[in-house]
Image (cartoon, grey):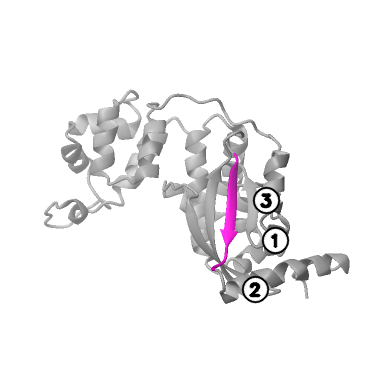
Amino acid sequence: MSDQELGEFLRARRARVSPADVGMATSGTRRVAGLRREEVAVLAGVSADYYARLEQGRETNPSGQVIDAIANALRLGTDARWHAYRLAGLLPKTAPAAPHTPVHPALLQLMDAFPTAVAYVINHRLEVLASNALADALLSPLADPRRMVRSLFHDPAARELFADWETVARDSVEALRLAAGQERRDPEIAALVRELLADSPEFAALWQDHSVSGLGRKTKVFNHPDVGRITLTYQAFDVQDASGQYLLVGTAETGSTDADSLALLGPLHAAGRRNGARPGAG
Protein backbone atom coordinates (compact mmCIF):
# COMPACT_ATOMS: atom_id res chain seq x y z
CA MET A 1 0.00 0.00 0.00
CA SER A 2 1.31 3.46 -0.96
CA ASP A 3 2.20 6.23 1.47
CA GLN A 4 0.25 8.51 -0.89
CA GLU A 5 -3.03 6.65 -0.39
CA LEU A 6 -5.05 9.54 1.03
CA GLY A 7 -4.01 11.86 -1.80
CA GLU A 8 -4.73 9.20 -4.44
CA PHE A 9 -8.13 8.58 -2.89
CA LEU A 10 -9.04 12.28 -2.79
CA ARG A 11 -7.94 12.85 -6.39
CA ALA A 12 -9.99 9.91 -7.63
CA ARG A 13 -13.09 10.99 -5.73
CA ARG A 14 -12.71 14.65 -6.75
CA ALA A 15 -12.75 13.59 -10.40
CA ARG A 16 -16.18 12.01 -9.91
CA VAL A 17 -17.95 15.12 -8.57
CA SER A 18 -19.07 17.71 -11.12
CA PRO A 19 -19.64 21.39 -10.33
CA ALA A 20 -23.34 20.82 -11.03
CA ASP A 21 -23.42 18.12 -8.34
CA VAL A 22 -22.50 20.71 -5.71
CA GLY A 23 -24.42 23.67 -7.16
CA MET A 24 -21.45 25.49 -8.69
CA ALA A 25 -21.93 27.53 -11.85
CA THR A 26 -19.36 27.02 -14.60
CA SER A 27 -18.47 28.69 -17.85
CA GLY A 28 -16.04 27.92 -20.65
CA THR A 29 -14.06 24.75 -21.21
CA ARG A 30 -12.85 22.85 -18.16
CA ARG A 31 -9.51 21.03 -18.38
CA VAL A 32 -10.11 18.61 -15.49
CA ALA A 33 -12.67 15.90 -14.85
CA GLY A 34 -14.82 16.75 -11.88
CA LEU A 35 -13.96 19.51 -9.44
CA ARG A 36 -10.77 21.54 -9.37
CA ARG A 37 -8.65 21.45 -6.22
CA GLU A 38 -9.49 25.03 -5.37
CA GLU A 39 -13.21 24.29 -5.70
CA VAL A 40 -12.95 21.46 -3.19
CA ALA A 41 -11.00 23.80 -0.90
CA VAL A 42 -13.76 26.41 -1.07
CA LEU A 43 -16.46 23.84 -0.36
CA ALA A 44 -14.48 22.38 2.56
CA GLY A 45 -13.49 25.76 4.02
CA VAL A 46 -9.73 25.19 3.81
CA SER A 47 -7.04 27.00 1.84
CA ALA A 48 -6.29 25.82 -1.68
CA ASP A 49 -2.62 25.38 -0.71
CA TYR A 50 -3.52 23.16 2.25
CA TYR A 51 -5.80 20.98 0.14
CA ALA A 52 -3.13 20.68 -2.55
CA ARG A 53 -0.62 19.51 0.08
CA LEU A 54 -3.11 16.84 1.19
CA GLU A 55 -3.47 15.47 -2.33
CA GLN A 56 0.29 15.58 -2.87
CA GLY A 57 1.03 13.73 0.36
CA ARG A 58 2.91 16.71 1.86
CA GLU A 59 0.33 17.20 4.63
CA THR A 60 0.15 14.08 6.77
CA ASN A 61 -1.75 15.16 9.88
CA PRO A 62 -5.19 16.46 8.88
CA SER A 63 -7.69 16.87 11.64
CA GLY A 64 -10.96 15.00 11.82
CA GLN A 65 -12.78 18.28 11.21
CA VAL A 66 -10.87 18.80 7.95
CA ILE A 67 -11.47 15.26 6.71
CA ASP A 68 -15.13 15.57 7.62
CA ALA A 69 -15.43 18.84 5.67
CA ILE A 70 -13.68 17.35 2.64
CA ALA A 71 -15.87 14.24 2.85
CA ASN A 72 -18.92 16.49 2.75
CA ALA A 73 -17.51 18.44 -0.20
CA LEU A 74 -16.85 15.24 -2.15
CA ARG A 75 -20.20 13.74 -1.14
CA LEU A 76 -18.64 10.60 0.27
CA GLY A 77 -20.92 7.84 1.49
CA THR A 78 -20.51 6.16 4.86
CA ASP A 79 -18.01 3.50 3.75
CA ALA A 80 -15.91 6.00 1.78
CA ARG A 81 -15.96 8.48 4.68
CA TRP A 82 -14.65 5.92 7.17
CA HIS A 83 -12.09 4.84 4.58
CA ALA A 84 -10.83 8.45 4.38
CA TYR A 85 -10.55 8.61 8.18
CA ARG A 86 -8.48 5.40 8.17
CA LEU A 87 -6.16 6.66 5.43
CA ALA A 88 -5.68 9.88 7.40
CA GLY A 89 -4.72 7.90 10.51
CA LEU A 90 -7.67 9.24 12.50
CA LEU A 91 -9.08 5.92 13.68
CA PRO A 92 -7.61 3.84 16.51
CA LYS A 93 -5.29 1.12 15.28
CA THR A 94 -6.84 -2.30 15.78
CA ALA A 95 -5.08 -5.60 16.11
CA PRO A 96 -4.63 -7.14 12.66
CA ALA A 97 -6.94 -10.00 11.79
CA ALA A 98 -5.37 -13.38 12.41
CA PRO A 99 -4.30 -14.59 8.97
CA HIS A 100 -5.56 -18.16 9.15
CA THR A 101 -8.08 -18.45 11.97
CA PRO A 102 -10.22 -21.58 11.44
CA VAL A 103 -13.98 -21.27 11.26
CA HIS A 104 -15.49 -22.18 14.62
CA PRO A 105 -17.30 -25.57 14.70
CA ALA A 106 -20.43 -23.90 16.05
CA LEU A 107 -20.55 -21.63 12.99
CA LEU A 108 -20.07 -24.62 10.69
CA GLN A 109 -22.99 -26.31 12.42
CA LEU A 110 -25.10 -23.18 12.01
CA MET A 111 -24.40 -23.03 8.27
CA ASP A 112 -25.37 -26.67 7.85
CA ALA A 113 -28.67 -25.86 9.57
CA PHE A 114 -29.64 -23.66 6.58
CA PRO A 115 -30.98 -26.33 4.20
CA THR A 116 -32.65 -23.83 1.86
CA ALA A 117 -30.02 -21.08 1.98
CA VAL A 118 -26.56 -20.66 0.53
CA ALA A 119 -24.10 -19.95 3.36
CA TYR A 120 -20.36 -19.48 3.48
CA VAL A 121 -17.72 -17.77 5.58
CA ILE A 122 -15.16 -15.51 3.92
CA ASN A 123 -12.16 -13.56 5.17
CA HIS A 124 -11.17 -9.97 4.43
CA ARG A 125 -9.43 -11.15 1.24
CA LEU A 126 -12.84 -12.52 0.12
CA GLU A 127 -11.50 -16.08 0.24
CA VAL A 128 -14.12 -18.72 1.06
CA LEU A 129 -13.07 -20.41 4.30
CA ALA A 130 -16.08 -22.71 4.73
CA SER A 131 -19.37 -23.33 2.97
CA ASN A 132 -22.49 -25.42 3.33
CA ALA A 133 -23.57 -28.05 0.79
CA LEU A 134 -25.85 -25.68 -1.11
CA ALA A 135 -23.09 -23.09 -1.47
CA ASP A 136 -20.75 -25.81 -2.75
CA ALA A 137 -23.36 -26.74 -5.34
CA LEU A 138 -23.95 -23.15 -6.42
CA LEU A 139 -20.24 -22.38 -6.88
CA SER A 140 -19.33 -25.78 -8.34
CA PRO A 141 -18.80 -24.48 -11.93
CA LEU A 142 -15.77 -22.50 -10.72
CA ALA A 143 -12.38 -24.19 -10.91
CA ASP A 144 -11.32 -22.60 -7.59
CA PRO A 145 -14.33 -21.24 -5.71
CA ARG A 146 -12.28 -20.73 -2.55
CA ARG A 147 -10.15 -17.93 -4.04
CA MET A 148 -13.10 -15.89 -5.21
CA VAL A 149 -11.43 -12.66 -6.38
CA ARG A 150 -8.85 -14.52 -8.45
CA SER A 151 -11.62 -16.68 -9.93
CA LEU A 152 -13.67 -13.64 -10.89
CA PHE A 153 -10.87 -12.23 -13.03
CA HIS A 154 -9.09 -15.41 -14.19
CA ASP A 155 -11.73 -18.14 -14.55
CA PRO A 156 -13.93 -17.88 -17.68
CA ALA A 157 -16.59 -19.93 -15.87
CA ALA A 158 -17.13 -17.01 -13.48
CA ARG A 159 -18.36 -14.83 -16.33
CA GLU A 160 -20.90 -17.52 -17.20
CA LEU A 161 -21.98 -18.25 -13.62
CA PHE A 162 -22.51 -14.62 -12.57
CA ALA A 163 -25.16 -13.17 -14.89
CA ASP A 164 -24.12 -9.62 -13.96
CA TRP A 165 -20.39 -10.27 -13.80
CA GLU A 166 -19.48 -6.58 -14.09
CA THR A 167 -21.47 -5.69 -10.96
CA VAL A 168 -20.13 -8.64 -8.96
CA ALA A 169 -16.56 -7.80 -10.01
CA ARG A 170 -16.98 -4.13 -9.09
CA ASP A 171 -18.56 -4.93 -5.72
CA SER A 172 -15.77 -7.39 -4.94
CA VAL A 173 -13.00 -4.91 -5.78
CA GLU A 174 -14.69 -2.20 -3.71
CA ALA A 175 -14.95 -4.58 -0.75
CA LEU A 176 -11.31 -5.61 -1.18
CA ARG A 177 -10.15 -1.99 -1.23
CA LEU A 178 -12.18 -1.27 1.90
CA ALA A 179 -10.53 -4.28 3.57
CA ALA A 180 -7.11 -3.10 2.40
CA GLY A 181 -7.73 0.19 4.21
CA GLN A 182 -8.74 -1.67 7.36
CA GLU A 183 -5.89 -4.19 7.22
CA ARG A 184 -3.09 -1.99 5.90
CA ARG A 185 -0.39 -4.20 7.42
CA ASP A 186 -1.65 -7.43 5.84
CA PRO A 187 1.00 -8.67 3.39
CA GLU A 188 -1.41 -11.18 1.81
CA ILE A 189 -3.84 -8.47 0.73
CA ALA A 190 -0.95 -6.47 -0.70
CA ALA A 191 0.32 -9.54 -2.59
CA LEU A 192 -3.15 -10.31 -3.96
CA VAL A 193 -3.59 -6.74 -5.18
CA ARG A 194 -0.14 -6.69 -6.81
CA GLU A 195 -0.86 -10.00 -8.57
CA LEU A 196 -4.18 -8.85 -9.97
CA LEU A 197 -2.88 -5.42 -10.98
CA ALA A 198 -0.21 -7.18 -13.02
CA ASP A 199 -2.46 -9.86 -14.53
CA SER A 200 -5.86 -8.23 -15.06
CA PRO A 201 -6.45 -4.87 -16.77
CA GLU A 202 -10.11 -5.09 -15.69
CA PHE A 203 -9.11 -5.41 -12.05
CA ALA A 204 -6.59 -2.59 -12.44
CA ALA A 205 -9.23 -0.23 -13.86
CA LEU A 206 -11.63 -0.96 -11.01
CA TRP A 207 -8.88 -0.67 -8.38
CA GLN A 208 -7.73 2.70 -9.68
CA ASP A 209 -11.29 4.01 -9.34
CA HIS A 210 -10.74 4.06 -5.54
CA SER A 211 -14.39 3.22 -4.80
CA VAL A 212 -15.06 1.41 -1.52
CA SER A 213 -18.12 -0.40 -0.19
CA GLY A 214 -18.96 -2.99 2.41
CA LEU A 215 -20.46 -6.37 1.66
CA GLY A 216 -23.85 -5.40 3.08
CA ARG A 217 -26.96 -6.64 1.30
CA LYS A 218 -26.59 -7.56 -2.37
CA THR A 219 -28.73 -9.20 -5.04
CA LYS A 220 -26.90 -11.67 -7.29
CA VAL A 221 -28.15 -13.48 -10.36
CA PHE A 222 -26.61 -16.82 -11.31
CA ASN A 223 -26.74 -18.76 -14.55
CA HIS A 224 -26.11 -22.25 -13.22
CA PRO A 225 -25.53 -25.02 -15.79
CA ASP A 226 -27.67 -27.49 -13.84
CA VAL A 227 -30.78 -25.46 -12.96
CA GLY A 228 -30.60 -22.26 -14.98
CA ARG A 229 -31.16 -18.73 -13.70
CA ILE A 230 -31.39 -18.12 -9.93
CA THR A 231 -31.73 -14.77 -8.16
CA LEU A 232 -30.56 -14.64 -4.53
CA THR A 233 -30.48 -11.90 -1.93
CA TYR A 234 -27.30 -11.95 0.13
CA GLN A 235 -26.78 -10.52 3.60
CA ALA A 236 -23.35 -10.28 5.24
CA PHE A 237 -22.73 -10.59 8.98
CA ASP A 238 -19.53 -9.94 10.96
CA VAL A 239 -18.30 -12.99 12.86
CA GLN A 240 -17.84 -11.37 16.23
CA ASP A 241 -15.33 -13.80 17.74
CA ALA A 242 -13.11 -14.03 14.63
CA SER A 243 -11.84 -10.69 13.38
CA GLY A 244 -11.83 -10.47 9.60
CA GLN A 245 -14.38 -13.25 9.04
CA TYR A 246 -17.86 -12.67 7.59
CA LEU A 247 -20.85 -14.95 7.20
CA LEU A 248 -22.69 -14.56 3.89
CA VAL A 249 -26.19 -16.00 3.57
CA GLY A 250 -28.03 -16.08 0.24
CA THR A 251 -31.75 -16.78 0.05
CA ALA A 252 -34.37 -17.00 -2.66
CA GLU A 253 -37.82 -15.45 -2.35
CA THR A 254 -40.18 -17.92 -0.69
CA GLY A 255 -42.43 -19.67 -3.20
CA SER A 256 -40.55 -18.36 -6.22
CA THR A 257 -39.11 -20.30 -9.13
CA ASP A 258 -35.70 -19.28 -7.74
CA ALA A 259 -36.52 -21.18 -4.54
CA ASP A 260 -37.60 -24.20 -6.58
CA SER A 261 -34.38 -24.13 -8.59
CA LEU A 262 -32.30 -23.80 -5.45
CA ALA A 263 -34.10 -26.79 -3.92
CA LEU A 264 -33.21 -28.87 -7.00
CA LEU A 265 -29.58 -27.81 -7.04
CA GLY A 266 -28.46 -29.58 -3.88
CA PRO A 267 -29.65 -33.08 -4.84
CA LEU A 268 -28.34 -32.69 -8.42
CA HIS A 269 -24.92 -31.71 -7.13
CA ALA A 270 -24.87 -34.58 -4.63
CA ALA A 271 -25.89 -37.07 -7.33
CA GLY A 272 -23.15 -35.80 -9.63
CA ARG A 273 -20.55 -36.31 -6.92
CA ARG A 274 -21.78 -39.83 -6.19
CA ASN A 275 -21.54 -40.67 -9.89
CA GLY A 276 -18.01 -39.30 -10.08
CA ALA A 277 -18.86 -36.50 -12.53
CA ARG A 278 -17.84 -32.94 -11.98
CA PRO A 279 -21.05 -31.08 -11.00
CA GLY A 280 -22.12 -28.68 -13.70
CA ALA A 281 -20.21 -30.55 -16.41
CA GLY A 282 -21.93 -31.87 -19.52
Q: Amino acid at mark 3?
A: Met
Q: Amino acid at mark 1?
A: Leu
Is residue 251 in the magenta section? Answer: yes
Q: Which residue occupies the foreground of this view, 51 or 87? A: 87
Q: Are marks 2 and 3 in contact (CB under 8 Å)?
A: no
Mark nearer the N terminus (2 vs 1): 1
SS for dot 3: helix
Q: Which residue is tagged 1?
A: 134
Give left or right: position of 79 versus 112: left
The magenta-colored residue range is 245-253
Q: Amino acid at mark 2?
A: Ser
Quadrant, the C terminus: bottom right
The percent position of residue 263, horizontal first and vertical second, equals 68, 70
The answer to whether residue 216 is above or below residue 254 is above
Q: Residue furthest right?
A: 275
Q: Which residue occupies the foreground of this view, 217 or 100? A: 217
SS for dot 2: helix
Secondary structure of the magenta portion, mostly?
strand
Identity of the residue drawn at 58% across and 34% down: 243
The percent position of residue 233, horizontal first and vertical second, equals 52, 61
Residue 261: numbered disc: 2
| Mark 3 residue crowding within 10 angstroms, few (<14) / some (14–19) / many (20+) | many
The percent position of residue 151, horizontal first and vertical second, equals 65, 56
The answer to whether residue 55 is above or below residue 166 is above
Res. 52 visible in picture: no
The percent position of residue 202, horizontal first and vertical second, equals 52, 57
**Marks 3 and 1, Cα distance to the nearest angstrom?**
10 Å
Q: Which residue is tagged 3?
A: 111
Which numbered mark, 3 or 1, is in the foreground of this view?
3
**Marks 2 and 3, Cα distance to the nearest angstrom?**
20 Å
Is residue 7 in the magenta section? Answer: no
